[in-house]
Amino acid sequence: MNAAEEPMLVERFAMLCRRNPIVVDAVLAALLLWIAISWTLEGRVPRAMQAAALVVAVLAAAPVVFRRTHPIPAAVATAVVAGVAQLAIVGTAAVILLPALVMGYSAIAYGPRWAGAAAFLLLLSGATVRSVVQLLTEPVGPDHSLVLLWLIGSALGIAAGVWLAGSLRRASFRHTEGLRERARLLEESRRQEVRIELLAERSRISREVHDVVAHSLSGIIAQADGGQFAAQRDPARAVEVLAGIADTGREALGDVRGLLEMLRDSGVDDEGPDAAGRPQPGTDDVPALVEQVRAGGLRVDLETTGTPRPIATGPGLTAYRVVQEALTNVIKHAGPGTPAHVRLEWTDDELVVRVRDEGARHPVPRPPRGGHGLTGMRERAALHGGSVETGPHPDGGWAVRLRLPLTTQ
């Protein structure tokens, strides 16, 4: 925070007062007590009643300490003290006047609505009970009656002003609390949005890592298995298999570097075939993917119908990853010797990708369950308004079908 943003002295004092309401109200209670004592000793209370008036002053000012933390009990206590003092001690009106006004304001401003109103009326009754009793019971002349009526009218006018001030403070307080609650909800909503974005990003990265690593490792394993037999019969063929394994490993390393690059804030100045900043693969890269898998030992063919055309990066990457994952599953579940077929069907409004195998010719060891391949394919398709269907093919084997609405670049 720079010097221009530093709070002023008055602002810091206001913040301190808001953080310590009991201390502030204790100072207010001490001030009211000092005023009451001064009025008592100045002769506004008969000398015979001064000691009792001082006790009343203390009892009336003490609840002011809790006017904001416990407004209703404090207001009731002040009302009881005022009523008893008015009936039992002559001349205590000046002693209880200011505490009664402060507590009436506090009951309306800080207490529950109906409880505050009841406490306010109780305070009003306690503060004016003596005048009302005199007006009703004592024989009065015209002048004296007018004085009492004027006093009661003044008390009602002051009470109306206190009620209005308390109501305005209550409305302001509720408005401020509403703004704070709205700000809290907005902040919570922003945090939820950030959390959802982070989860979505983690899911996307998880899909990318799974597709890249699982495909590459499956290809390497298939080529390594074939290389074991080739090394015994045809050493030259084994050298080609090892070269294929090296190429697959380099490509996988480049893909992983690309994923890591997306997590960094700045790019990496890297040149060469394994540069991390290369573009994401799309439908144009499917033939190269099929050729790479075919070189790894899987008997796979590619067929394209319709007129291929450029599509957006996201759907294109989805089509590529679905083909990649489906062929990886063929290697893992049906074996590298199983024939597989990839078909891209381009229509006016959608792209349909079909991948199926003809079924294993011999038992294949099953990998551990719990993979994320099928889930990742469905999530990718759903992000772009598409769908993925998987299941046994009527002619044998397993089939995967992806439907993507076409969105041009």
Image (cartoon, helix red, strand yellow):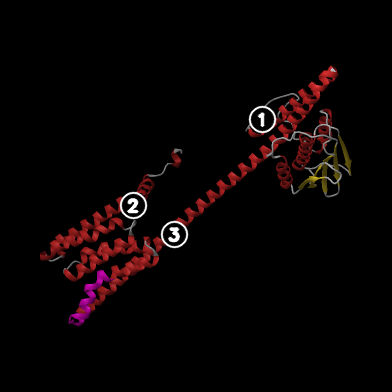
Magenta stretch, main secondary structure class: helix
Q: Which mark is residue 174?
A: 3
Mark 1: amino acid:
Gly
Q: Looking at this view, name the residue that lies furthest to the left.
A: 48
Quadrant of residue 352 within the rendered picture: top right
On the image, the x and y values in percent for residue 175 come to 46, 58
Q: Nearer the viewer, residue 375 or 132?
A: 375
Mark 2: amino acid:
Pro
Q: Are marks 2 and 1 in contact (CB under 8 Å)?
A: no
Horizontal side of 3 relative to 251 (left or right) equals left
Query: Quadrant location of the C terminus?
Result: top right
Q: Nearer the viewer, residue 183 or 335?
A: 335
Horizontal side of 60 relative to 254 (left or right) equals left
Q: Relative to 51, does residue 347 appear above or below in the rendering?
A: above
Q: CA distance from mark 2 to mark 1?
A: 54 Å
On the image, the x and y values in percent for residue 349 come to 83, 50
Look at mark 2 in the image and give the residue it sits on: 21
Q: Which mark is residue 267?
A: 1
Tell me what residue is drawn at x 25 percent, y 65 percent.
97
Look at the numbered disc 3 and give the secondary structure of its residue: helix
Horizontal side of 198 relative to 9 (left or right) equals right
Mark 3: amino acid:
Arg
Q: Relative to 157, does residue 281 appear above or below in the rendering?
A: above
